[in-house]
C-alpha cells in the first residue's frame, strides 16, 4: 500500500512558476514509477510526465513543450513537478500517481495509487 500526498499548489500569475511535491508513504517508493496528471473542470484527466523507478528515466507529454520538469528524491520518498512559464490553461487539479505496472505509463489506468490532488490556478 502506498499513500500519496501532493502539496505546492496555489494561485500564480501567468508566466510564473510553481513546484509541486508528492510525498509517498512506505519503504517501497523507489520501486514505483511515478507520474503526474492534471484534470481541468469538464475535461478528462491528462497525462503530464512520468519518471521511472530505475535510472529515473523521464517522459513528458508533447504539449508541455519543455515547461515542466519531473524529478524524484528516493531518500525523501518524494517526487516533484517544477512548472515554469505557467499559462491560464494550466489551471487544473494536479495529481501524482504510482505504478509498478511496467508499461503504459502515459495512461491513467496504469497507476495503482493516486494522491488527492492539489489545485493550481493561473491568473491572466
Image: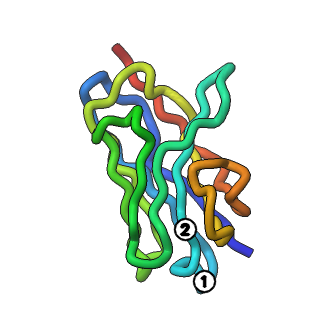
Q: Which residue in the rendered view is the most extreme toward the top?
A: 124
Direction from residue 64 to residue 34 in the image, left or right? right
Whether label 2 touches label 1, CB < 8 Å: no
Which colouring convention does the figure follow?
rainbow
SS label for mark 1: loop
Q: Where is residue 45? Give x, y as percent.
A: 64, 36
Q: Where is residue 2? Give x, y as percent.
A: 68, 72
Q: Quadrant of the N terminus?
A: bottom right
Count of marks placed on residues = 2
Q: Where is residue 119? Give x, y as percent.
A: 54, 36
Residue beneath disc 1? 28
Direction from residue 47 to residue 112 in the image, left or right? right
Residue beneath disc 2? 33
Q: Which residue in the rendered view is the most extreme toward the front?
A: 103
Q: Relative to 79, is 68 above or below?
A: above
Q: CA distance from mark 2 to mark 1?
A: 11 Å
Disc 2: CA contacts within 10 A as few (<14), some (14-19) or many (>=20): many
Q: Relative to 6, is 122 above or below?
A: above
Disc 1: CA contacts within 10 A as few (<14), some (14-19) or many (>=20): few
Residue occupying the point 28% across, 41% down: 66
Foreground of the two, 14 or 66: 66
Foreground of the two, 107 or 37: 107
Direction from residue 113 to residue 93 in the image, left or right? left
Q: Where is residue 20? Give x, y as percent.
A: 42, 50
Q: Residue 90 lies in what quarter of the image? A: top left
SS label for mark 2: strand
Residue occupying the point 34% across, 13% down: 124
Which mark identifies residue 96? none
Amino acid at each position: 500500500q502506498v499513500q500519496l500526498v501532493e502539496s505546492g499548489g496555489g494561485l500564480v500569475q501567468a508566466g510564473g512558476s510553481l513546484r509541486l511535491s508528492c510525498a509517498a508513504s512506505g519503504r517501497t517508493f523507489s520501486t514505483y514509477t511515478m507520474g503526474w496528471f492534471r484534470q481541468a473542470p469538464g475535461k478528462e484527466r491528462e497525462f503530464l510526465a512520468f519518471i521511472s523507478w530505475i535510472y529515473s528515466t523521464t517522459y513528458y507529454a508533447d504539449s508541455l513543450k519543455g515547461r515542466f520538469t519531473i524529478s524524484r528524491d528516493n531518500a525523501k520518498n518524494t517526487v516533484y513537478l517544477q512548472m515554469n512559464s505557467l499559462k491560464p490553461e494550466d489551471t487544473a487539479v494536479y495529481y501524482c500517481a504510482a505504478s509498478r505496472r511496467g508499461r503504459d505509463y502515459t495512461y491513467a489506468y496504469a497507476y495503482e495509487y493516486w494522491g488527492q490532488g492539489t489545485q493550481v490556478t493561473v491568473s491572466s
